[in-house]
Amino acid sequence: MLIDCGQCAMQHTSACDDCVVTFLLGTKPVELSDAQSDAVSNLASAGLVPHLRLIPVDREKRVS
């Protein structure tokens, strides 16, 4: 799973403050294996880190 904040519809909103990516890694793109993605999901479900708040944006269809 590729997580890229630059491709997230919630970038630069208050959702970033409560997203596991910015909480743990900052805003640099990161690629997680399936096992890593499952681990992050399990940590979030246990309340140890925030949930992933990524909402992908299709830049091709975006209206300026």
Image (cartoon, helix red, strand yellow):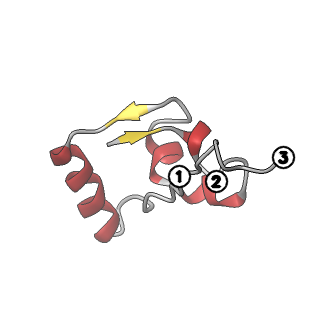
| Vertical placement of residue 54 versus 1, above or below | below
Quarter that holds the N terminus = top left
- Mark 2–mark 3 CB contact (< 8 Å): no
Front: mark 2 or 3: 3
Per the model, the C-alpha gap separating discs 2 and 3 is 14 Å
Q: Nearer the viewer, residue 32 or 25?
A: 32
**Amino acid type assigned to the residue bearing label 2 in the image:** Ala
- At numbered mark 3, what does the secondary structure look like: helix, strand or loop? loop
Mark with earlier residue (2, 3): 2
- The image shows residue 54 at horizontal and vertical percentages of 51, 55
From the top left corner, tell me how far across and down residue 33 is, in percent: 21, 39
Q: Is residue 8 left or right of residue 51?
A: right
Which residue matches tag 1?
56
Q: Position of residue 17 (x, y in %)?
A: 62, 54
Q: Residue 3, relative to residue 37: is it above or below?
A: above
Most extreme residue toward the front is 61
In the rendered structure, are the residues bearing label 2 and label 1 in contact, judged by CB atoms less than 8 Å apart? yes
Q: Which mark is residue 64?
A: 3
Which residue is more in the foreground, 44 or 34? 34
Q: Is residue 3 left or right of residue 55?
A: left
Density class for disc 2 (Cα within 10 Å; few <14, some 14-19, many ≥20) is some
- Label 2: which residue? 9
Q: Secondary structure at mark 2?
A: loop
Q: Secondary structure at mark 1?
A: loop
